[in-house]
Image (tube, rainbow, N blue to C red):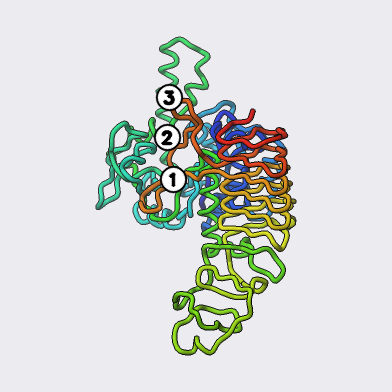
Amino acid sequence: MLKAVILIGGPQKGTRFRPLSFEVPKPLFPVAGVPMIQHHIEACAQVPGMQEILLIGFYQPDEPLTQFLEAAQQEFNLPVRYLQEFAPLGTGGGLYHFRDQILAGGPEAFFVLNADVCSDFPLNAMLAAHRQDRHPFLLLGTTANRTQSLNYGCIVENPQTHEVLHYVEKPSTFISDIINCGIYLFSPDALKPLRDVFQRNQQDGQLEDSPGLWPGAGTIRLEQDVFSALAGQGQIYVYLTDGIWSQIKSAGSALYASRLYLGRYEFTHPERLAKHTPGGPQIRGTHPAPILNLCPLPHTPLPSEPGLLTSGPELKSQSLPLPIQIWFGVFGPRASLLLLGNVYIHPTAKVAPSAVLGPNVSIGKGVTVGEGVRLRESIVLHGATLQEHTCVLHSIVGWGSTVGRWARVEGTPNDPNPNDPRARMDSESLFKDGKLLPAITILGCRVRIPAEVLILNSIVLPHKELSRSFTNQIIL
């Protein structure tokens, strides 16, 4: 029997996610078409023997969270419960406070996942490693380059046994290129060190003669209070993964996480990806059908049926009516090109046939996309309207917002260096030397953008009606 715990934090967290977190709790923000933590729940539900999934956090159990829990239970046929902390208790305090609920039924182990991470969640592989050599703590680790590793918890491991010999959270100097992914597998014995930290905090509070420090006594930081203290004592081990992983701390990182998840949908949820249909919108994807043999565009006529570019003498006797669209080595008449692109479109959205979408586009519930719209590397949240011939690049369009005709909304991506396989998302800062840094453009809830204006590298707070163009500004 197994359980899973997802740490969703609270409203005092996620400030870098504003203004998007004004309207919905950050864990419920749609990433690749579904709430952020649904990716976690889907991964946990696929683990054999999973009996219950617990969400621990400090959010009020409002209507969106309650509806999400009910829908998740029905979809995955698993108990999914929310346990609300009486105060923010850190990454480990909630685990200790709700230890009875976690251990109810006698699970052999339980997963612990931070809500603000994007991953392919190799939970079955972690479970197999745990069962082969059982220890209280198993951490999922990946690699980062030397500079970016300073922004994460760094792990020094024994390369033969994978024991964690040293752990430092966000060190000031280089320690290791192995970083903590925020995904763990704990045995029931892992709660004993948390009890020791709790009792030590209580004693410290009594020594200071401050009866009001109870919330402080319950606050336990897994990384600093447990991992750093127990490293090198044969209790903590690391499982290394080379799969996808990224933190989701800001709107820009949510857009990058959406790209990673959409790329995986081809293998995990192909039904979620939009496909080319005759008379439908044009989907420009990054995962076309397999290309057998590519060659430069010939000056001779091409085949009369859509197919793959080929080389050889048979090419000379083939013809194709114009116009023709050629993307990624696949060609065919515009209305009949069938490609699997990394684009998600909610079934209730209305997308004009002449719109061009992708790559990395997510369109939410009830969205209207007009004729001639160009969407790329963007998230359009439910109820938004993109009028005719708008262009939205590297942006997030908020709930119920409207972008006028021929307007352009564009941001600047902050993606990891594509030439460095160990590069990660940088910690985004809004300002440097008193100036707003270029980043993705964010339109808050119910923003109205007029026709024929440019909104570039800007953040627009909710309920604003603009009348002109803006560049590199925060519109309050």
- The residue mark sitting in front, 2 or 3, is 2
Q: Quadrant of the C terminus?
A: top right
Look at label 2 and name its amino acid. Answer: Leu
Can you tell which mark lies on residue 390?
none
Disc 2 from disc 3: Cα separation:
15 Å
Asked if residue 337 lies left or right of residue 94, the reply is: right
For disc 1, the marked residue is 184
User: Could you tell me which secondary element the residue under label 1 belongs to?
Assistant: strand
Residue at image location 43% in from the left, 22% down from the top: 201
Number of marks drawn: 3
- Badge number at residue 222: 2
The secondary element bearing badge 3 is classed as helix
Q: CA distance from mark 2 to mark 1?
A: 11 Å
Outermost residue toward the front in this view: 299
Mark sitting earlier along the chain (2/1): 1
Q: Earlier in the sequence, mark 1 or mark 3?
A: 1
Q: Is residue 188 left or right of residue 262?
A: left
Relative height, residue 84 to residue 131 (above, below):
above
Please indicate, yes or no, whether residue 101 appears anywhere in the rendered image: no
Position in image of residue 204 (x %, y %): 41, 17
What amino acid type should be assigned to the residue bearing mark 1? Tyr
Pinpoint residue 103: horizontal percent, then vertical percent: 52, 42
